[in-house]
Amino acid sequence: MKLVVDHIKDTPLALQIDEAAELFPVLALLQHEQGVTFTSPIHGDVTAVREYDHLRVNGRLTTSLLLSCSRCLAEYDAPVDTSFTLLYRKDSHKMFSTDDEVELDEAELLTLSYTGDEIDLTHEIEEQIALEIPIKPLCSESCRGLCHQCGADLNIAPCSCRNEEVNFKFSALQGFKVNR
Ligand SMILES: [Zn+2]
Ligand SMILES: [Zn+2]
């Protein structure tokens, strides 16, 4: 997605996109190598406005994912809805290069620079989406996961392995008492 700087006049410029995740290199990689499935295109509403010596770009991105729970392995739908604000300055000396490892507070506004008469938002958009994808996806905070011994999904029903373990401890305790 590219913004043509000359199109941003005194009134804000509004743009919409609906693009397949495949068109974003980082997202395509996540889809192919990390088991993340995009079930709808990346939808973006972007507004660009001139402010003082810079351009302010506000955007809202939505899409939906199919993720695999890291505890119980079940697939579940995960909607993504995220907003961002970026500031761009036309500059010959770059303040931040996206290749540099710059540690930034997430709340801080990142001031980027652009050269020429176009701003390519492709990388910024895919970064924003990638940040929303959990490293350890969970179908629910209270997911019980799978039994380590028999593999049963403990969200559906407790398995007998657990019961045996409890019973064993209980009987051992009883035996101890009897022996005294
Ligand atoms: Zn789960
Ligand atoms: Zn079990």
Image: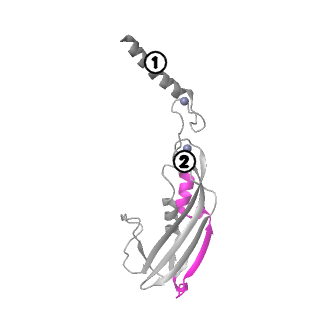
Question: Range of the magenta residues?
Answer: 5-33
Residue 171 badge: 1
The answer to whether residue 117 is seen in the rendering is no
Q: Is residue 30 placed above or below 158 in the rendered structure?
A: below
Mark 2 or mark 1: which comes first in sequence? 2
Q: Which residue is at a point 51% across and 23% down the rendered structure image?
A: 164
Quickly name the residue at label 2.
140
Q: Which residue is at a point 47% across and 72% down the rendered structure image?
A: 85
Q: Amino acid at mark 2?
A: Ser
Residue 120: x and y in percent read 51, 74
Asked whether 18 or 11 is in front, the reply is 11
| Ligand 2 falls in quadrant | top right
Q: Looking at the image, how many numbered discs can be counted on the residues?
A: 2
**Disc 2 Cβ-to-ligand 1 distance below 8 Å:** yes
Helix, strand or loop under label 2: loop
Q: Is residue 54 placed above or below 125 in the rendered structure?
A: below
Q: Is residue 22 magenta?
A: yes
Query: Image check: 104 left or right of 78?
Result: left
Where the N terminus falls, by quadrant?
bottom right
Q: Is residue 133 placed above or below 178 in the rendered structure?
A: below
Q: Residues within 10 Å of mark 2 (few under 14, many from 20)?
A: few
Q: Which residue is at a point 51% across and 83% down the rendered structure image?
A: 5
Distance in Å between CA atoms under marks 2 and 1 = 35 Å
Residue 152: x and y in percent read 58, 33
Helix, strand or loop under label 1: helix
Q: Amino acid at mark 1?
A: Ser
